[in-house]
Image: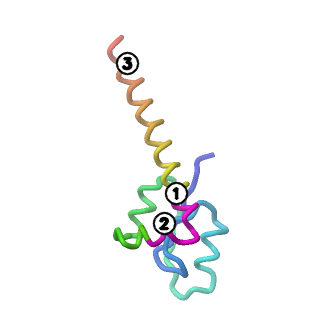
């Protein structure tokens, strides 16, 4: 099963969360909450529309583990995609 990231653009604490439960805590009973799930961490970050100061504030908040683990997950995905691209290039050269 593919990982999901939950982006909260408008809620108690704007950010990107790894679980629905964490996301839900930020949006429940919050008027006009804006949130969405993504399979790509980059899309989730884009949805939140953070500026650099907000990224730093979130990274330094109690939600830091979500931010750091989301970035680490993105790096793993990027490496996996690069391996697929490299493998595809190798196959194309031999055929």
Residue placed farthest to the bottom in the image? 31
**Residue at the spot of label 3:** 90
Give the overall secondary structure of the magenta segment.
helix
First along the sequence among labels 3 and 1: 1
Q: State how far apart marks 2 and 3 are (Cα).
A: 39 Å
Report the magenta residues as a range: 57-67
Residue placed farthest to the front in the image? 60
Badge count: 3
Would you say the residues marked 2 and 1 are in contact, meaning their CB atoms lie under 8 Å apart? yes
**Residue at the spot of label 2:** 59
Disc number placed over residue 68 in the picture, else none: 1
Which residue is found at the position 57% from the left and 61% from the top? 66
Residue 42 figure quarter:
bottom left
Residue 87 in the image: state x and y as whole percent: 42, 23
Is any atom of residue 7 visible in this view?
Answer: yes
Quadrant location of the C terminus in the rendered image = top left
Q: State how far apart marks 3 and 1 are (Cα).
A: 33 Å
């Amino acid at each position: 099963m593919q990982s999901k990231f939950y982006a909260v653009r408008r809620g108690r604490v704007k950010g990107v969360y790894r679980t629905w439960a964490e996301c839900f805590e930020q949006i429940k009973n919050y008027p006009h909450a804006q949130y969405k799930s993504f399979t790509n961490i980059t899309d989730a970050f884009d949805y939140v529309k953070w500026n650099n100061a907000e990224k730093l504030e979130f990274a330094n908040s109690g939600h830091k583990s979500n931010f750091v683990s989301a970035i680490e997950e993105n790096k793993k995905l990027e490496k996996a995609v690069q391996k697929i691209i490299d493998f595809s290039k190798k196959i194309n050269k031999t055929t």
